[in-house]
Image: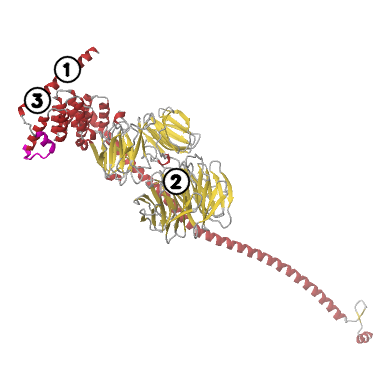
Amino acid sequence: MRLKTSLLKEPKHILCHRKSTQHDELVSCVGWTTADELYSCSDDHQIMKWNPVTSETTRVVKLPDDVYPIDLHWFPRGIGGKKQSQAESFVLTSSDGKFHLISKSGRVEKSVEAHNGAVLAGRWNYEGTALVTVGEDGQVKIWSKTGMLRSTLAQQGTPVYSVSWAPDSDKVLYTSGKQLIIKPLQPNAKVLQWKAHDGLILKTDWNSVNDLILSAGEDCRYKVWDSFGRALYNSQPHEYPITSIAWAVDGEFFAVGSFNTLRLCDKTGWSYALEKPNTGSIFSISWSIDGTQLAGACGNGHVIFAHVVEQHWEWKNFEITLIKRRTMKVHNVVNDAVDLLEFRDRVIKASLNYGYLVVSTSLQCYVYSTKNWNTPLIFDLKEGTVSLILQAERHFLLVDGGGLYLYSYEGRLISSPKYPGMRTDILNAQTVSLSNDTLAVKDKADEKVIYIFEALSGKPLGDGKPLSHKTEIVEIALDQKGLTSERKIAFIDKNRDLFITSVKRFGKEQKIVKIGTMVQSLAWNDTSNILCGIQDSRFTVWYYPNTVYVDKDLLPKTLYEKDASEFSKKPQIVSFVGSQVRIRRADGSLVHLHISPYPSILHSHVSASHWEEAVRLCRFVKDQTLWACLAAMAVANKDMTTAEIAYAAIGEIDKVQYINSIKDLPSKESRLAHMLLFSGNTQEAETLLLQAGLLYQAIQLNINLYNWDRALELAVKHRTHVDTVLAYRQKFLEDFGKKETNQRFLQYAQGLEVDWNKIKAKIEMEIAKERERAASSSSGRTSVTVQQ
Amino acid sequence: MAQAALGAAGLHFDELNKLRVLEPEVAAQTAQLREECRAFVDKTAEFQKIVGSLIEVVDQLAKAAESEKMKAIGARNLLKSIAKQREAQEQQLQALIAEKKMQLERYRIEYETLCKIEADQNEFIDQFIFQK
């Protein structure tokens, strides 16, 4: 599923100029209503409506001669439960210091005196509850939905050229000369301000999905920032000032406009394609809602339309390219076969993984199997405009404006998970993860929380409480293979620490274990539970991340590390299929890496419980890492023979000894308990022993762990072996030359004579008893097997 | 004699014996003068005609010259601006080339890593065969 978006795409623009009924003066602003309808305003006071599909252009209205439009923004659609298929009105700012609320039909509903001098920009927030306007007078004003002044957020000496809302609509980003300012709406909250450009900043944009900020200025550069004001990308200087910049809605790319220049860039800043249309300066760019096309307002009176095509998907031996808006070319590299896939409508999103190609057009969803390109499975979409497709081996997830829908590859709707306050428009591949049995979604309202659903029923997993973490989570990923009960989720938090935890929680809180720091990007393998990530300047593969639950000390030995400085800074892992890892460098080039195929083979042997083969494989490869993995896997699956061999191979003699001692234990229960102890689960080991009625063993366990209080508590509670505990305690104190200070021990020690002979006899008796019991139960078991 | 007497009275006879007030010689000269004048007037008219047509031709030439001159100026300006246009075009093409170069560099890096993988895989296969 990592193949979906940021693959080797080189979309180019198809440019279509409309010479017929064009504006006579420069076009100042454009805005889409639906995927196929665009409004534009120009200095000739006209508002025009364009339909790029039918090439129709109509004049909506002519504004009064003193109104020179500057900026236009459509009211956000589908707000407050009402599912409007399209926007109904827009705000238009003009040079006479007013903004106008204008309906779709062109009627001016309201004109409001807003600023001294021109109103340079106006933006609705994402909920449509507030409007922000900025003007030449240096003021930033917040207005209600109906155009009543709520507050003047800021006031400064220089004109404010551009403004945008934060994803959660509680902050506003605006320009101040060469600086960018993020100001929260709360009066006393901290203002973030930084120098962004060497020239005047002309345009900014803040994406709601990836939370990244764009800025463009008269220094002829464009830059990408994160929401803390850290620079992520700084472009080469262009020949002319950058006059417009805009994010596509899904935050995967953005467009940059300048004099006779239109550029399409990846979210990390590098440029996919450059066009040099004859347009004059492009003053404003607007992306359609489905993110497949954009329109630019040109200085010479044209409106330029551009489509994103030639997106590229790769999986194993298949290469798929969107050659036209409705046509895909499938290239099978192995036999050089080429198939053309035709669609009825425009392709909006596609994903290729696990042997299936899922394509969403504006009305339908097509599912192709890579075995057969001729007969796709087609079903109608509920709402259209799919914003994300995620695939797992058995099913796939479609995300649109209304919800999350899980479909099988046969086209059957499996489930539609929901959680309170769900906002699907801001989900992306980093915040949603799907595996065969589980779906995980990171919520925007509380970034510390991950909602986990059972994929097949769409119900929250376990007790329904979401998984919560101490700090904000940035990226999540579910492992793809193995048993449902062992499903793991790996996530990166705000501090770039990598954690792993089990999604199933049995009553008590599951441990969240940190396994990496400074992790930029991560990916699970598609065929076995191997995790790879880029950690600071190293590329790391966790061959068996489950090791942390088995034998934490062993984790460093199960890693494969490689210097990643050759990938330059901030590389992103695109996919991890088979033993191939694809990494996108910051400059946009794809780097392929090959990791050893053996761990994957080892995983498959172990999951089939073929321990003999697993050991043979390790002997053949003679690799310490592989032996360490096998050791952890054997312990996890409680196969002590294999564990012993594997630990011996990596020279962990102490552990071999312990395993041997476990083998000598009389009963099955104590063996299990000691295996749990081996993995560091003392609590569980004790519970297991108590359940089996092995009181002495439980007490001895606590004594061995120097857990005196618990040992005494157990002994007192069950009225047995109190003297044993006291004797051992005394011995311990004597060895260390200390005096008893613990009140409870002092209390019980009174009037109790420690007699080692008696204690030893008692211990012998207990062990004999256990042996006897084990013998009887095992003989019972063998008789059962005989009966079968 | 009689002639002399008539002459004194201002009367003369010409060769056709018609009575004349002027002396025959003078009369003849007058007539000649008249003829000569007529011829002169005719010639003048003809001259005027010729000059007129000449002026017309010259005017036409002037017009033609003027338009040619304008054309030349236009052409010269065009020539000057073409140099600029070419420069802009070149700049645009350069930008496009730079873009392609960047893409090429990306492909080159990808190709290199793929080559490396191929080498690794081959080595792996060799090792595998050797160990078997």
Residue at label 2? A126
- The CA span between labels 3 and 1 is 21 Å
Image-based side of A145 in relation to B34, left or right? left
- Describe the element under mark 3 as helix, strand or loop: helix
Residue at label 1? A776
Q: Are marks 1 and 2 on the same chain?
A: yes
Look at label 2 and name its amino acid. Answer: Tyr
Q: Quarter of the image holding residue A545?
A: top left
- The CA span between labels 2 and 3 is 74 Å
On whether residue A742 falls in the magenta region, the answer is yes
On whether residue A240 falls in the magenta region, the answer is no
* Magenta segment: A734-749
Look at label 1 and name its amino acid. Answer: Ser
Image location (x, y in percent) of residue B56: 68, 65
Mark 3 or 1: in front is 3
Our reading of the magenta stretch's main secondary structure is helix
* Label 3, residues with CA under 10 Å away: few <14, some 14-19, many ≥20: some
Residue at label 3? A762
What is the quadrant of the N terminus of chain A in the image?
Answer: top left
